[in-house]
Image (cartoon, rainbow, N blue to C red):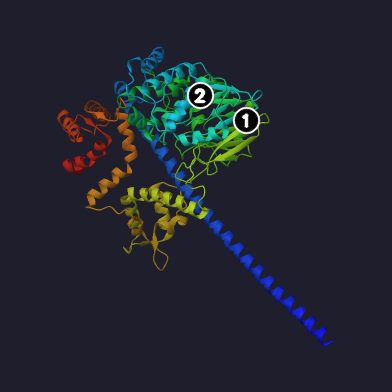
Amino acid sequence: MGCNTSKALSEELDDITEKTATDAQLRATILIQQWFRRWRAELEIRRRYTWTIFQTMEYANENEQLQLYNFFNEIISGLPDAFNALQMKKSEPEGSRAEFFSRLSNPEFVTIEAGYDGPTLTLPLTLQQITDLIEAFKEKKVLHAKYVLVLLGETRKQLKLVENVQRVSTQITGKVTVVGDLHGSLDDLLMIFFKNGLPSSDNPYIFNGDFVDRGPHSVEVSVILFALKLLYPNTFFINRGNHEDVIMNKRYGFTTEIVNKYGVLANRIAKSFEGVFRVIPLVTIIDSSVLVCHGGVSDITDIEYINNIPREKYASILRPPVKSGETEIDLVEWRQMLDLLWSDPKPGLGCEPNTFRGGGTYFGPDITDFILEKHKFKLLIRSHECKVDGYEQVHEGKVVTVFSASNYYDEGSNLGAYVKIGTNHKPQFVQFTASEKTTKLPLYTKVSMIESSALRDLRTTLFANHGALQAAFEKLDTAKAGLITKAEWANCMRTVLKLDLPWLTLRSKLVDTDENGKIRYSSCFENGELKGDIDNKRLTEEIYRQRNTLETIFRILDTDNSGCITKEELRAGCELLAKHNQSVSLSSEELEQLVDTMDIDGNGEINFNEFLESFRLVDSKFGPEKN
């Protein structure tokens, strides 16, 4: 009896012990799960605000570009001679345009040096030539200017025969692959071909614009795409993007890339690329059911109207073209082009100007439904926006965004993607990254790396606006204690920088607080504080802030795309400004002195570094009042 009782007690104690251990394990498991969920939520918050920083600063930069271009157009509107000189748009007669671009792309006057060991191209192109071309580009070889001109001349001829609206069928091949923005990323293009196969008669592709700018290999990407278009004219399609644009190219790197790679022949090649960009089709329709365009739609989008637009006259989409002697502008036609290449979808209803970018519209789900029903389409595929996963579906899945440049903002910032459309017209997405550096890193490390990069860019913007921010902070600091509230700080950041970011969330990454939670606003500038006297700091800050604008002005003044401004080009630009703005009064002697001052090394040309440095020299030489 006693033994049985002891055994029963022992078993009961074991049960209690086991239950206690189980309860402890359960509590520990719950605590770990709660911690992990909180950790993942914090990472997601960091990832999202990092993405917001990158995208907000990119779109703000595009908005500035549009404003700058409009400013120059206002200056030039009444001065046709200067208009032609600065190349803001072409005024050659319609009849001579074909001859003009044909003459530019004529390779007969370009000789190939004896030591050239790069790829070669001869017409008609073969698949072997394109394969050899790709292998040469992998080895970082540059295609000779003569072959580039041959390719561009033939591409322009073929594209001119194609309508604005192209039509593709999946009935024979069973599928078509749509690729989004590449922005000069050769690695991403090659990754797509590796995963999805080279284009062929059985493997059709649509490349949806923005082949160039930002990335370092825009020439190579464009050359490969144009060569494939010539080889497979019926199964390889390209749409124009908002960066196939002569003005965007001056700002975002393609013109600079051509200058660096082709030197004295850069102007001829840049103009020949422009000739091709002008005639790239605007829209591709798959099986009369799927609309593929670069940006999006608006409440006035009309595919039949778009198909009849003389697209070649649009060297730039940023402003409606006007021929010399004309006074009327076809705003409806221009809006059709602008909205098609610049618009973005939005979650709310309606259609409104895209003030974030400065061009195109925001279109809501009701506009999507209206345009799709009007043309009897089922789906809209567009690009134009970088997405963290490489793609996004909105408006109940009726609008697909596909973006194919991985690591667009920085290493690990986003995946690239392409979309495959079969006979059922349901999108199938394939994601990838062209870099192996971050693929094996832990999530926390990836997020931290991208966050650091975004915050570094943001601090650069703070540095460039030091004076304006300091003045705004001091105005609120009536006690002169160096402190303001968090709300005051966030409002200053938003109004001065004109960046709609989650400033209160970012606060701990950018500034310090005192024991009462107030912002010590001087800590905004402690990393990267300018050294030197106050006047030099302000001047450096101003040049730093306006660097992109100054570079665009430099590229516009550099009418022959040589990478340098000649004294004659600079003189013509200064005279133009003096004619437009009466407060800019320069005598011929003062103008000559200004030109000589900017030509620091005295070689008769002004490169970009001299152009920037001249602002410091002119300021110190003439003083702020004279400036």
- Residue identifier under label 2: 228
In the rendering, which numbered label is found on residue 372? 1
Q: Residue furthest left?
A: 589
In the rendering, which numbered label is found on residue 445? none
What residue type is disc 1 on? Leu
In what element is the residue under mark 1? helix
Percent coordinates x, y for residue 357 in the rendering: 45, 38
The C terminus lies in quadrant: top left
What residue type is disc 2 on? Leu
Percent coordinates x, y for residue 349 in the rendering: 59, 39
Local crowd size for mark 1, using a 10 Å CA cut-off: few (<14), some (14–19), many (≥20): some
Q: CA distance from mark 1 to mark 2?
A: 31 Å
Answer yes or no: do the residues labelled 1 and 2 have beta carbons within 8 Å? Answer: no
Q: Residue furthest bottom?
A: 2
Q: Residue at x 33, y 37 (%)?
A: 549
Relative to 527, residue 600 above or below: above
Local crowd size for mark 2, using a 10 Å CA cut-off: few (<14), some (14–19), many (≥20): many
Q: Residue 574 or 393: which is nearer the viewer?
A: 393
Q: Is residue 527 visible?
A: yes
Q: Residue 112 or 249: which is nearer the viewer?
A: 112
Relative placement, left or right, of 323 versus 32 is left
Q: Which quadrant of the view contains residue 515?
A: bottom left
Relative placement, left or right, of 390 versus 511 is right
In what element is the residue under mark 2? helix
